[in-house]
């Protein structure tokens, strides 16, 4: 049976044996940069990150690219990839491309019935993306891209066969094929001579997107481009046990525009690694490794020492879930309040961008 990653698990032992089989490299200390994602095993693997790191150290240009399918409200699960993009965009030598993937969202998401709907979400998503610190000049909407980009998607299509799609995705759905072609173009087009020219590029993705990354690298070979580098992030899981954080299931997610009341309700109902009684938990300690409250702090709290302390106190039975949830709720509520203040200003820029 074909081995697949569980991108929403947090147990590293699931991954280690699979890295070799999939040809991924583990993130050694020598490659780590000064961001907490590297220290907390949120970034867990890479393909050719060395090439990008060399460019960073040599102060030579490199491309970084990411994007978001504009198919719903944004939640905390989206934030990690965006935070990472902001981090790399601060290197003076980075050439940044951020795709608002409105056509992709329309073609590949069943629930998006019209292009207009995808664009409506794009305006909303853009306001949040700007508030998170993504530079406006790096952002483009697929539907507003220049002809060379679309011409390139046709060039890419000539190099892919139906069997290749079938092998990678297990289906040949026309909408999804179109969406995939745009995604390959998003990652590769900055290397065309009309843009930055051939050079290393970096994209942060989830492990579940690796087949897509491999196909993109195959295409780069066929166009004599630099093979794009990827770093692999864990996904933040949903707030309930065994769930993904999903735009269409509010109980699994905290949205970036949630009110204080909504945040509190969801944090208080989140699945924890606590024990049935306070007494038992004080004696035996809880399990932060399966706890969604701890996961929220791990992904979003900037203080590594603080997150570690909560972890240790939980393990030792020195903190109970009620107090811990309150700490998490206060932190997330304050963080999102500050974010929502910024969104009030960026929304006007987002509306103007799409006019
Ligand atoms: Fe999770 Fe905190 Fe409870 Fe530990 S004490 S299980 S980290 S909520």
Image (tube, rainbow, N blue to C red):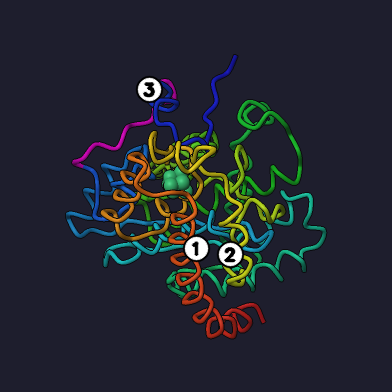
Q: Which residues are magenta?
A: 20-30
Q: Is residue 339 left or right of residue 262?
A: left
* Circle nearer the viewer, 3 or 2: 2
Q: Residue at x 68, y 67 (%)?
A: 121
Q: Secondary structure at mark 3?
A: helix
Badge 3 or badge 1: first in the primary sequence? 3
Q: Position of residue 113 (x, y in %)?
A: 82, 58
Q: Along the horizontal axis of the image, is 276 left or right of 124? A: left
- 279 or 221, nearer to the observer: 279
Which residue is identified by label 3? 20
Q: In which quadrant is the N terminus drawn?
A: top right
Quadrant of the image occupied by residue 195:
bottom left
Q: Are marks 3 and 2 in contact (CB under 8 Å)?
A: no
User: Does label 1 or label 2 sit earlier along the sequence?
Assistant: 2
Q: Nearer the viewer, residue 106 or 15?
A: 15
- Asked if the residue at label 2 sits under 8 Å from ligand 1, the reply is no
Q: Which residue is mark 1?
A: 329
Mark 1 is surrounded, within 10 Å at the Cα level, by few (under 14), some (14 to 19) or many (20 or more) other residues, namely many
Residue at 57 percent across and 52 percent down: it is 152
Left or right: where does residue 149 sit relative to residue 232? right
Q: Which residue is mark 2?
A: 263
User: Circle 2 — which element?
Assistant: helix
- Residue 164 in percent (x, y) is at 62, 29
Tell me the quadrant of the picture where the C terminus can be found. Answer: bottom right
Q: Residue furthest right?
A: 113
Q: Is residue 349 magenta?
A: no
Return the mark for residue 181: none
Q: Residue at x 59, y 79 (%)?
A: 350
Q: Mark 1: which secondary structure?
A: helix
């Amino acid at each position: 049976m074909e081995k697949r990653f569980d991108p929403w698990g947090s147990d590293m032992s699931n991954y280690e044996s699979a890295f070799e089989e999939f040809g991924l490299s583990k993130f050694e200390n020598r490659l780590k940069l000064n961001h907490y994602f590297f220290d907390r095993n949120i970034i867990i693997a890479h393909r050719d990150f060395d090439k990008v790191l060399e460019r960073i150290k040599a102060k030579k240009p490199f491309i970084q690219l990411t994007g978001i399918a504009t198919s719903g409200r944004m939640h905390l699960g989206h934030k990690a990839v965006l935070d990472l993009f902001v981090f790399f965009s601060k290197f003076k030598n980075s050439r940044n491309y951020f795709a608002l993937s409105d056509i992709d969202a329309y073609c590949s998401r069943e629930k998006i019935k019209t292009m207009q709907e995808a664009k409506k979400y794009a305006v909303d998503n853009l306001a949040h993306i700007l508030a998170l610190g993504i530079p406006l000049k790096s952002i483009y909407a697929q539907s507003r891209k220049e002809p060379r980009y679309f011409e390139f998607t046709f060039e890419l299509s000539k190099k892919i066969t139906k069997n290749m799609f079938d092998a990678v995705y297990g289906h040949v759905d026309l909408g999804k094929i179109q969406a995939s072609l745009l995604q390959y173009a998003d990652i590769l087009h900055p290397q065309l001579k009309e843009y930055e020219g051939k050079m290393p590029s970096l994209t942060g993705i989830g492990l579940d997107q690796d087949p897509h990354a491999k196909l993109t690298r195959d295409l780069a070979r066929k166009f004599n481009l630099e093979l794009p580098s990827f770093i692999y992030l864990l996904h933040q899981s949903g707030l309930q046990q065994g769930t993904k954080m999903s735009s269409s299931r509010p109980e699994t997610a905290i949205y970036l525009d949630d009110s204080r009341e909504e945040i509190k309700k969801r944090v208080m109902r989140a699945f924890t690694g606590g024990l049935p009684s306070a007494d038992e938990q004080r004696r035996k300690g809880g399990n932060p490794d399966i706890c969604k409250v701890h996961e929220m702090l791990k992904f979003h709290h900037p203080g590594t020492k603080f997150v570690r302390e909560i972890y240790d106190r939980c393990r030792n039975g020195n903190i109970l879930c009620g107090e811990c949830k309150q700490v998490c709720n206060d932190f997330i509520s304050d963080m999102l309040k500050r974010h929502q203040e910024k969104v009030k200003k960026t929304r006007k820029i987002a509306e103007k961008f799409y006019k």
